[in-house]
Image (cartoon, helix red, strand yellow):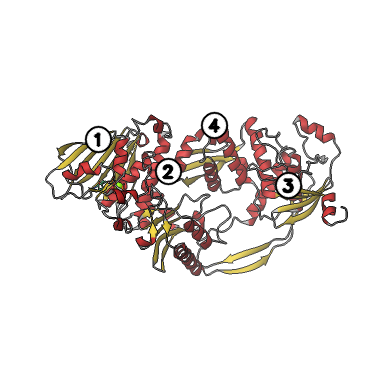
Amino acid sequence: MAEIKQLSPLVAARIAAGEVVERPASVIKELVENAIDALSTHITVELRHGGITYMRVTDNGKGMAEEDVPTAFLRHATSKIETGEDLENVVTLGFRGEALYSVAAVANVEILTKRREDPFGTSAKVSGGGAPVLAPAGCPDGTSVIVRDLFFNTPARMKFLKKDSLEAGYAEEIVRKIALARPDISFRFISGGKELFFTPGDGSLENAVAALFGREYANAMLPVEYAQDGVKISGLIGKTELSRPNRTFQIFFVNGRSVMHKSFYVALGEAYKGQMMQGRFPVCVLHLNIDPALCDVNVHPSKAEIKFANDKPVFDVIYWGAKNALYAIRDTRKLQIESVPKPVQTEKIVQGEQTAFMPPKKETAVKTDIKPFVKEETPSRIEEERVMAAVEKIIRKEAAPIMEDEPPMVASPSFVPPVKKEEPQVEKPSAPQREAIQEAPAPIIKILGQAFDTYIVAEADGKLLLVDQHAAHERIIYNALVEEMEGKGIDSQLLLLPVTVKLSPSEMAIFKENSEVLLKSGFEAEEFGAGFVKISMVPTALSGCDVAAAFVEVIDRLSGRRDTKTEAQTYALYGVACKAALKAGKLLSVREQEVLVEKALMLDGVATCPHGRPLILSLTKTDIEKQFKRIV
Ligand SMILES: Nc1ncnc2c1ncn2[C@@H]1O[C@H](COP(=O)(O)OP(=O)(O)OP(=O)(O)O)[C@@H](O)[C@H]1O
Ligand SMILES: [Mg+2]
């Protein structure tokens, strides 16, 4: 009896209709999901030209009977559900009976399939939605679907496809996710004739993670196993050292399906609260199991979103599951923390007679009999040197000319950047507009201190100023980088030891697409084995910074839509400046504050950081007096 049946119009109408074929990656996702639903244990995905000319998914699953093959290509024809009631309890990945129909409408599709119990298999060819042409075929048990010339009959959609390497990256990312969803299935991924990964399919999530991201990465993950209010969670979360600048490595599955929901990342973020630096995100591969009746995957045609009858138990199980895993490592560290007062230091910061007074810092010494899991903070000594080097660089450097592409955004309409103060020991600026400024009477900058270790409070030119230290430093560095690039090129330095960094497939594609931009930004990096990049040279502005994190940050900045090389270049430099800049929350010496304020005030006309946030807020004496009702 035929297994695949067309759904009644009533049931079909309840299924979210929509586009399932957007790009090769969406086809791959549908074909692999079909292979999983057919109970396969080995699945091979093969692409050529990013999948645009050729995709093949081969499985060793249950196959189809000859009589079912033509039905499989009909719209709303499925073997997975029959009634509206079944729709409430979907346990397979597919259920709409739409994927093969949609793919066959926009490509040339060939299927070879054989059930174990049949003596021979069936081949079927469909071109651009026409009728399938069937023939008996000698083939192994299972199914192989070949999709050629995607969008050959819809040139408008073809135009939206990106370069082959990017399309291959998207497809690889999807199959990696599915491989993490199903560590019990062995996945092989081949692109352009090269095998990019192979998972063992032995049921161990850790082994799947190791096959995809490397053993070291897998070793820095913590197991999560928790259940509450009927929701179960299991999987792995990363120790803080695996944190990323975005959420790409936060992977969640609900009943085996890769989905995203706001509660997931909010709960995870909450669990790491206080342990994760601002702008960094934990990584995870987490599986949730919940009664299918309590969630709805039918929200979005690509099934990437999910709705829960109640979000709270889902939030709780992730939060407590992750929190417990993190507590578990704390307990094994047996830390003893004691305060060690540090003597007051004075330090030379510039050539010549100036000295900076470093305020005494409370330092903590960590005594532990076991090597702590969490990477220790950068030693404060190195950090201090870095800050001083940055300041020295600011002193040596002159601010770059005003950026023309960015409209000046002055925080307070009353703020007009004052002129530069005379400073005999500082090299004279070269830009002509500076010369004119130099001759004007110099304002005196009075540093009043640092608020919240983030804003410098100063008095200058009759105004009370609040300077955002990170934003100001970022803009100063950015302008200096632009100046360097337009001049002799970005100043870069060779790393003593090259740094290798693991990239996701889409990050790798961005890296490859932007090699020229990266080189121009001062990075020398090359692909180094599957998924790794070796960095051998970095912009000097980054000296002392976490090179890997800075590199990923720059890649991240390049990931949005960048229409021109110049735009990409600008974003790359934003990334470098952001990483090289002093952080908010960093205690600064009076001299450091003074230099920063002075340099920020010299950026006349550009009163925003590269992201458009204001650098300086100001209040005149009159503004203040009005507030105190001294004057009306
Ligand atoms: N690799 C495969 N092995 C065995 N049967 C398959 C395979 N691929 C497709 N089929 C059969 O073809 C039918 C139609 O597949 P199709 O992907 O179009 O729909 P679906 O998987 O039922 O639902 P969805 O549109 O949500 O994916 C399936 O229900 C299944 O019976
Ligand atoms: Mg399907």
Q: Is residue 585 left or right of residue 38?
A: right
Decide if ligand 1 comes within 8 Å of the CB at mark 1.
no
Q: Secondary structure beneath disc 1?
A: strand
- Alpha-carbon neighbours of circle 4 within 10 Å: few (<14), some, or many (≥20)? few
| Cα distance between the residues tagged 2 and 1 | 31 Å
Using the image, tell me which numbered label, if any, was put on residue 135: none
Amino acid type at image mark 4: Thr
> From the viewer's perspective, is 68 left or right of 285?
left
- Look at 55% across and 58% down and name the residue there: 276
Left or right of residue 448, residue 87 in this image? left
State the residue position of label 1: 126
The type of residue carrying mark 1 is Val
Compare marks 1 and 4 and give the one earlier in the sequence: 1
Question: In this figure, which residue is indicated by the disc labeled 2?
Answer: 505
Quadrant for residue 226, please give it: bottom left
Between disc 2 and disc 3, whose residue precedes?
2
Amino acid beneath label 3: Ile
Q: Residues within 10 Å of mark 1 (few under 14, many from 20)?
A: many
Count the labels in the image.
4
Image location (x, y in percent) of residue 203: 31, 58
Q: Which residue is mark 3?
A: 616
For the residues carrying marks 1 and 4, which lies nearer the camera in this image? 1
Which of the marked residues, 2 or 4, is nearer the chain's N terminus?
2
Q: Position of residue 628 (x, y in %)?
A: 84, 57
Q: Can you say whether 599 is above or below 402 in the image? A: below
